[in-house]
Image (cartoon, rainbow, N blue to C red):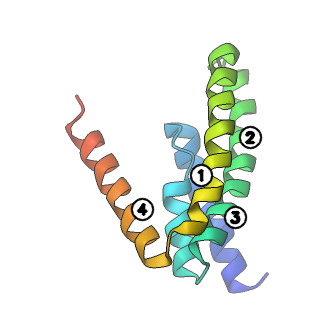
Amino acid sequence: MDPTSLFIVAGGVLVGIGASCSGMGGGFLMIPLLLFLGFSPQKAVGTTFLGIFLIALSSLVAHNKLAHVDFKYGILLGIGGIVGAQIGARLIDYVSTENFKKIFALILIALAVYVFVKK
């Protein structure tokens, strides 16, 4: 396995642990990693969703075994997410790489502030 692939697998392990514990999906970690490796924002986002999908399936199995899943509300969240995902996938084509990085950084900062000040 080449060094870049090994680096991505190691990053995936860390993201999987974090995503399964926090429910945050891991995209906030995967996207910067892929941007650092030279991916365009569009390809980084699309590739990240494949990774998140696989991590989410694995996490769902593990959390279901522990009876931590409310399928009714999870399905309802998913239905809304499907609609939003179709809109978002089309919108990203209209955002430049530079603006994407700025928007993504602002979202991460807002999330960090929220987590920090939430009691």
Q: Element type at marker 4?
A: helix
Asked if residue 30 lies left or right of residue 47, the reply is: left
| Residue indicated by mark 4 | 104
- Sequence-earlier tag: 2 or 4: 2
Q: Find the distance from the CA under tag 2 to the CA under tag 1.
A: 25 Å
Residue 55 lies, in percent from the top left, at 69, 47
Q: Are marks 1 and 4 in contact (CB under 8 Å)?
A: no
Q: In the rendered view, tell whether residue 79 sits above or below residue 111.
A: above
- Sequence-earlier tag: 1 or 3: 3
| Residue indicated by mark 1 | 88
Residue 73 lies, in percent from the top left, at 62, 17
Q: In the rendered view, tell whether residue 28 sits above or below residue 77.
A: below
Q: Find the distance from the CA under tag 2 to the CA under tag 4.
A: 26 Å
**CA neighbours of label 3 inside 10 A, class few (<14), some (14 to 19), many (20+):** some
Residue type, mark 2 in image: Ser
Please tell me whether mark 3 or mark 2 is closer to you in this view.
3
